């Protein structure tokens, strides 16, 4: 090994093939490919890579350690949802990941930032504020570590949704690199990758130029600026007209489904007028946007309740009558506090222990 060149101080899934080649400089070249395959295709933790020596495994772990330290792993009662709470290597910055096992697919919901700076009042992550961006490797590692758990249950992760803590398009470069790694190295198809955004227009424009056509989900929640300014403060910078233009362009260029997410809040955005306004926006896209309704989950910093189950169905049927394609997000994981988009990861607001949150799904 060339000891005169210092190794980069990066985490395991941030290390490049060139980094591994430098680490194993004294070894035959095929070793790098072998380790790469073990990490990304066979999804092995370092200590289970059995076709390299124990000394090499130690070398790898000490040069490029995993970024995530597991704090808690909770399964829901049905055994189909697993929530992971990690801290990053410095022992700070808790983040969360959720694995969801469906009949036809297994989905991981990953965080892209520790916290979030967007300040949506109804969201626990927003209430906790921003700590730091995650690196591409830290994002990829969440998917791989969850996939390792899925493998033990004889399930293969097929989908990754960027809907955990943080705003993916406020951390666009690392999110793009993570998407490329999940696609190129782990082998997840672009149609099974979904980026959810609060509506950062320059980020959507950047996404339009990505080589991979991922699914786009936009957290709309209101279809008129006055209300959206209140619910989603970034709307003041990127109002609805500008946002719709970016979505129309994305659909045109990428030909991928665009979904509008709508957390139903009692008497705030769940009237028939709201449904009509939303239907108008959906139809500005061709083919129309798909709507995903999420009954608002309670969070400590927001007192208004979510719409009742009956009202959620009513809102869905108004939309259907207006010709909009709509799904209601299924509830799961309520007993383990596992809801994408409202994760606070044990920060001041939410204790790490059980609480009441609902579904995470794609
Ligand atoms: N920052 C991105 C992705 C993470 S949030 C975004 O906002 O899209 C993931 C989803 O959870 C978003 O649609 C968000 O609006 C939603 N969400 C946030 N708080 C929620 C709550 N209390 N109840 C239901 N959904 C919520
Ligand atoms: Fe951030 Fe999304 Fe929560 Fe808004 S909803 S605060 S953008 S994580």
Image (spheres, helix red, strand yellow):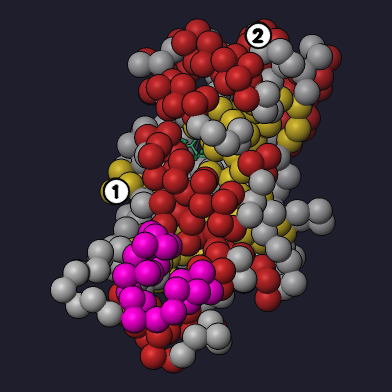
Q: Residue at x 49, y 26 (%)?
A: 209
Residue to which mark 2 is pinned: 284
In the picture provided, is 234 more to the left or to the right than 314? left
Q: Is residue 98 above or below residue 289?
A: below
Label 1 crowd (10 A; few <14 / some 14-19 / many >=20): some
Quadrant containing ligand 2: top left
- Specify whether residue 299 is in view: no
Which quarter of the rendered picture does the C terminus lie within? top right
In the picture provided, is 29 more to the left or to the right than 270? left
Q: What is the C-alpha distance between the residues marked 2 and 1?
A: 36 Å
Residue to which mark 1 is pinned: 132
Residue 60 is situated, as x and y percent measured from the top left of the image, at 38, 78
Q: Is residue 193 above or below residue 344?
A: above
Q: Residue furthest bottom?
A: 54
- Location of residue 166 by image quarter: top left
Q: Residue at x 41, y 57 (%)?
A: 137
Q: Residue 336 versus residue 147: which sits nearer the camera?
A: 147
In primary-sequence order, the first of circles 2 and 1 is 1
Q: Residue at x 55, y 65 (%)?
A: 40
Q: Residue 167 versus residue 33: which sits nearer the camera?
A: 33
Q: Which residues are magenta?
A: 11-34
Q: Label 2: state its secondary structure.
A: loop
- Location of residue 169 by image quarter: top left
């Amino acid at each position: 090994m060339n000891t005169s060149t210092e190794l980069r101080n990066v985490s395991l899934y941030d290390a490049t093939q060139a980094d591994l080649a430098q680490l194993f400089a004294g070894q035959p070249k095929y070793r790098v490919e072998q380790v790469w395959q073990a990490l990304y295709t066979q999804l092995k933790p370092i200590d289970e890579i059995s076709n390299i020596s124990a000394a090499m495994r130690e070398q790898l772990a000490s040069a490029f350690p995993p970024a995530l330290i597991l704090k808690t792993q909770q399964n829901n009662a049905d055994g189909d949802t697993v929530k992971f709470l990690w801290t990053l290597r410095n022992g700070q910055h808790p983040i969360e990941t959720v694995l969801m096992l469906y009949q036809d697919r297994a989905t991981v919901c990953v965080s892209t930032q520790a916290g979030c700076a967007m300040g949506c009042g109804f969201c626990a992550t927003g209430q906790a504020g921003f700590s730091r961006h995650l690196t591409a490797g830290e994002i990829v590692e969440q998917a791989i570590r969850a996939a390792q758990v899925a493998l033990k249950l004889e399930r293969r992760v097929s989908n990754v949704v960027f809907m955990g803590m943080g705003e993916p398009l406020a951390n666009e470069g690392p999110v793009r690199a993570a998407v490329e790694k999940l696609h190129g190295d782990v082998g997840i198809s672009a149609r099974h990758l979904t980026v959810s955004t609060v509506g950062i227009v320059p980020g959507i424009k950047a996404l339009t130029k990505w080589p991979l056509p991922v699914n786009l989900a936009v957290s709309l929640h209101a279809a008129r600026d006055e209300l959206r300014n209140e619910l989603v403060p970034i709307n003041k910078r990127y109002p609805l007209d500008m946002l719709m233009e970016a979505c129309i362009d994305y659909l045109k260029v990428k030909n991928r489904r665009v979904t509008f997410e709508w957390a139903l809040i009692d008497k705030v955005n769940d009237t028939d007028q709201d449904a009509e306004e939303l239907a108008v926006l959906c139809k500005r896209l061709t083919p129309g946007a798909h709507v995903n309704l999420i009954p608002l989950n309670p969070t400590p910093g927001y007192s208004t309740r979510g719409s009742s189950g009956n009202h959620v169905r009513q809102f869905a049927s108004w939309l259907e009558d207006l010709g909009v394609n709509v799904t209601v997000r299924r509830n799961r994981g309520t007993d383990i506090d596992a809801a994408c988009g409202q994760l606070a990861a044990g920060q001041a607001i939410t204790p790490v222990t059980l609480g009441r949150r609902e579904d995470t799904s794609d």
